[in-house]
Image (cartoon, rainbow, N blue to C red):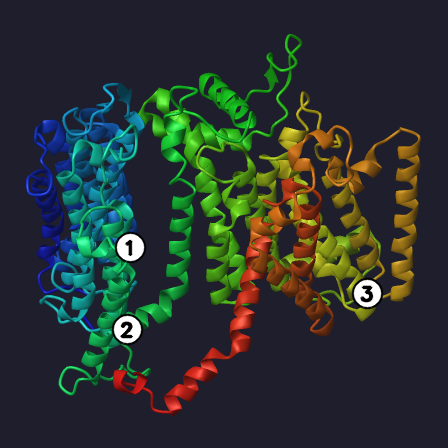
Amino acid sequence: MEKVSKTSQRPVFGWLIAPLAVLIAILANYVDGLMSIDVELNENALMPIIATGVAGLLAVTPRVLRQLGTLPASMTETRISLAMFVISLVGSGLIEQYIDSFTGFTFFVVTFVGYLLDARGRHEWMTMLTFAGVGVHSAMDITAAVAVAEYLPSEYLFPNGQTFDVDSFQKTALGFVFFTWLTIFPILGLAIGVAGRGLLSPASEKGWFAYGTVKEGAWNRNALPLQIALVIWAAAHMLTIWHFDQGSVADRLKLGGLAGVEANGYAGYWPALLTGIVAIIVSGMVAERWLTRAMTISSLWMLYLVGSWYESGFWENESFNDSWSPLIWLAITFFIGVAISMIGNHDKYGGWSNREEHRPSGARAFWNAHWASLLTAVAFIVGFVIRIQWYAVPSMYAAGTEGFDMTGGSDPWYMKRVVDYILAQNAHLVYDADRFYPIGGINPRPPLFSWSLALGAMALQPFVGEANAVWWSMLALPAVYGALTILPVATIAKDHFGKATGVIAAWLIAFMPAHVTHSTWGLADHDSFVMLFIAIGFMFYLRAVKYAGSERLVRTTSIHPLDMLRAMGAVAQQRKYAMSNAVLAGVAFGAASLGWKGFVVGPAILFLAYASQVALNMFRRRDSTILSTLFLTMLLTNLLIALPFYAHPQMNLVLDGTGLQPFLYILFFTIVIMYITTGFRDKPWLLVLGTLATGATIFFAILYVLKLTDVSNAWDVLFTGSGYFTKTKIFGTVAEANAPDRGYMFASFGPVVFVLALVVGLICLWKTFSQRSQISLVFGIWIFAASYMSWTAARFLFNATPVVAIMGAAGIVGLWKWANWDGLVRTWKRAGIRTPSDRI
């Protein structure tokens, strides 16, 4: 860790960051060297950039004034934060009035969020935010200048003499231009923030960049590899913009192969992005003196880029057109390897030693501290991108609707009807006159998902207009919810299996077909929304169980209600963290219940684990009061949140088999189990278990008789999963209610991942008995219950993805540990394998 002061030698230099961002934005608009377009720098173009630059100045002003000694001691951080919030709010309102809403939004974010980052010592991130805020306006100006008929037309004259609409191709190209320039500015901001650490801003001891040594008042030379990598990253994006400009109109629109058009396209966004990531990785290797690996990775990546450009037709050479071309590429690869080997073994240029483990570089120290959170964040970003990349443009330019479109059948369109009603009436659509037309009927869908879409549309209205806001909200939010599910899944895996398992689980669910197909851009159904909150509910409940324990918190118990309340009060008082997590689990499941009436699938699986654990505790003479109190607290919290909708007089879903009835059965069983096991805790376990078994037998016998006499369908509600587990003629016509093809089922999870998940489930059940692990029982029952449900009905493939990702990741990490890689590395080190010469 560096030892530096917390202030730069020249605090006023912090005021140079925002003007520098504005200057670069203005220079970027003169893109004659990169693009043959004319960006008009009028008042409409300059005012948003300048306003955001002012926001960047305001964000660092409190810190600069405090370092200069201008602020009085009575100005505490709380008062300054309140003042900055007011300034941000008032300033954004004025800018919204005189410029536009989006500029007002960026002013507020850059001012207030930038101040929060700067006040907490995250000066590099603050610099990056300022450049991003300024850059988004510059990117919009350049994109607007590109959208002209001479450069990117919306109609194209094909060689056959016919003119066709190429609006979707044009928007794809405009998206490339916008996101490329939007990416360049934050990268430049981060590069300037790192280079100016200790000069333009204080070298804080907090955050991601507090590694290595910094000399105050001077350029941050020790972070040179990172600075070079960031410059290469920005340059790669600039080169793709230059290549985009050099092509013809057909190349920019990527019309090659359509109606005889000859065009090769352009390099695109992703090669530049991946080049930047490779450059960052190589910079870390250079800092650690892994120079052989750095040369190998960078050389192979460049070779790949050159080869891909040849395949795309960006350059030609006759030598690569004949049958010898594979051997030529092989020879190039071979001689690159030979050159790297010769350099590594050279007496003068090679023979370098890696850093010792107890003296790591700043890059290695950073990686050791943040690798898990960094890789999880990247998994979230990648998961979000793949849920958008191939769906965004088709959903906005559909041929059938001649505009926006959605996927997933009729449900998303009815959701849009509900959202339109909410936006028009500021109320939920309860009675729909078009249902069962002309009679009319009740809208049976819970309100929270549709209201989240409506609120998203309200938030977007100032930026995209009233007509488009509802479409953007409905198309985008399902993908947002799907990507956000990655975070609770990773957290569950990390909490109970370790950091490595959390990272792998995040990547597994990010790519898992069963999850991606139900959480894409344009699939405006409740699936991804509900699964997000169910995963959050499991996350909090598992934390509650982890910190619950099975100690006896009260010496004696009885069936007297006051004694029961006293026992529950002891749990609330002595297990506060576990109780708070149980409440949060109830809130999460409550949110799920307001999005989908089938939410009970989550509490039902947990009830199986709870009942099984209580039975085991009776055999082991262990107290279940804590566990029962936590589970009951979760259920009651869920019930309180769900009741306002399900008990609505027009809904009448409290005792309905498709409403709260299954949940009420679980609540009733939990109360009975808790009452008997806690009240008779000190009685012989056989007597208690016998009492429960007898009561359950009588209860289910009554339900079965009521079923046979057609008095009640409670038996079917409990044992058929509302028809999903017992096929009827009606459910036989519903695709998702039928059992999936077994090959499709395994492919939806990944065959290896699914098998590993089942194996880990068996291990968890074994640990339940061998190690008396309550958490292992929950995981074991979760994976096998989810697998059975997926085996029975295709609807539940999506619901099983979180636990399959978690358990599959645990299996992968377990296999890695069993392979004993760490032991192999220790053997290498004992053998003295240190330099490239020794390795090669």
Q: Residues within 10 Å of mark 2 (few under 14, many from 20)?
A: some
Give the CA distance from mark 1 to mark 2.
Answer: 18 Å
Nearer the observer, 152 or 4: 152
Amino acid type of the residue that numbered disc 1 sits on in the rendered structure: Leu
Q: Identify whether 740 is placed above or below 617.
A: above
Where does the image place residue 461, in percent across and percent down from the top left?
34, 25
In the image, 277: left or right of 526? left
| Residue marked by disc 3 | 618
The label shown at residue 274 is: 1
* Mark earlier in primary sequence (1, 3): 1
Q: Is residue 248 above or below residue 269?
A: above
Quadrant location of the N terminus in the rendered image? bottom left
Q: Seen in the image, is 56 located left or right of residue 531?
A: left
Q: Which mark is residue 585?
A: none
Q: Is residue 14 above or below residue 85?
A: below
- Label 1 Cα crowd, 10 Å radius (few <14 / some 14-19 / many 20+): some
**Lower position in the chain sequence, tag 1 or tag 2:** 1
Taking the spot 41% from the left edge, 45% from the top edge, the residue there is: 386
Compared across the picture, whether 428 is left or right of 98 comes to right
Residue beneath label 2, please?
A: 293
Label 3 CA crowd tier, 10 Å (few <14, some 14–19, many 20+): some
Q: Quadrant of the C terminus?
A: bottom left
Question: Is 833 above or below relative to 737?
Answer: below
Q: Secondary structure at mark 3?
A: helix
